Amino acid sequence: MNTKEKVQRLQANVEKVIKGKSEVVKLAIVALLAKGHLLIEDVPGVGKTTLAQSLARSLDCSFRRIQFTSDLLPSDILGVSIYDPEKREFVFKCGPIFANIVLADEINRATPKTQSSLLEAMNEFQVSLEGKTIPLPRPFLVLATQNPMEYFGTYPLPESQLDRFMMRIRMGYPSVSWEKKILQGEDSAVTLENLKPALTADEVLELQREVEEVKMKQSLIDYLMALVVETRNSEFLGLGVSPRGAIFLQRAAHALALIEGRDYCIPDDIKSLVLPIFSHRVILDARLGSFGRRVEDAEEVIKEILEKVPVPL
């Protein structure tokens, strides 16, 4: 089975549960193969947690779910040393972070102190505790969900936390036709409970290694950097894209090219990923009113930048 067939098998498996959202599922797979973490943000009830669980169950990997609440502590995520009376010593008990796929459900309901316990794990794939550094299993992926319209009892993710997520995607409402099928019980033979793995951990690691071998011409690197620089120079943005964001865009473009069956990138790989990778990294300038125009959100500015920067031929 070649690379494209493996990816198609994984996507088809996830879509047994997640109906009518092919592009969303593809973006989630891009993040997985590019060794990035995924933030799924949308209104309640559209399937954010179901998408995360479907992807996790489609991989023959360890999976842990953490329900983030205001009283959650860092030790509840990372682990803690417990005294063992038989051994007469403290024994470290690993927390749920020590899994291949970690679902951080409603991540913005935890306090900033607890949120920060994920920073090292997400960036360096390791955890430092009690003077020791413990590597995390590979592959390692954090899938986080949050509801942007719920403000009571939530703590907005700081910029340093957001920057560690490769992508922020939205599920969106299902089409009317798909929602009617859901209500009528059609295509419901496969549920999360009986979803079988489509890929092993070793196959995922092999696909991640293949992503690193995908080529990107110098003209495309220049194009990518031109987009990044425009976000930093835009009069409508107070904070532009970080170097980590540029690296993530390149890696994600490599992964998308591999998914499409190519060992080289094209401009469309970059263009289709700019919004989900850039939009949560930029902040609108607080002085927008002084420029004589109104910008609804950062995504509109990024779309304008995409139109402004010439695409290499």
Image (spheres, helix red, strand yellow):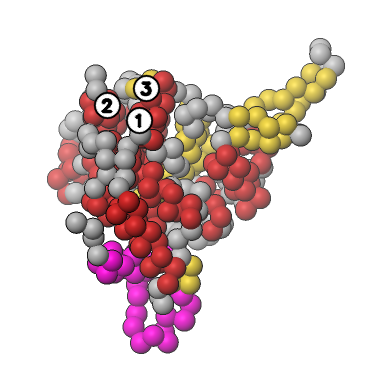
Q: Counting other residues with Cα less than 10 Å from the Cα at mark 2, is it few (<14), some (14-19), or many (20 or more)?
A: some
Residue beneath disc 1: 210
Q: Earlier in the sequence, mark 3 or mark 1?
A: 3
Residue 192 appearing in the image: yes
Instruction: Tell me the quadrant of the picture where the C terminus can be found.
Output: bottom left
Instruction: Quickly name the residue at label 2.
Output: 3
Residue at the right extreme? 88
Q: Position of residue 139 (x, y in %)?
A: 47, 29
Q: Are the residues flagged by discs 2 and 1 in contact, CB closer than 8 Å? A: yes
Amino acid at dot 3: Glu
Query: 118 or 114, which lies in front?
Result: 118
Furthest-top residue in this view: 86
Is residue 193 shown left or right of residue 11? Answer: right
| Mark 3, residue position | 203
What is the C-alpha distance between the residues marked 2 and 1?
9 Å
How many numbered circles are shown?
A: 3
Q: Is residue 12 magenta?
A: no
Q: Is residue 300 above or below residue 270?
A: below
- Decide: is 226 above or below 72: below
Mark 2 and mark 3 in contact (Cβ < 8 Å)? no
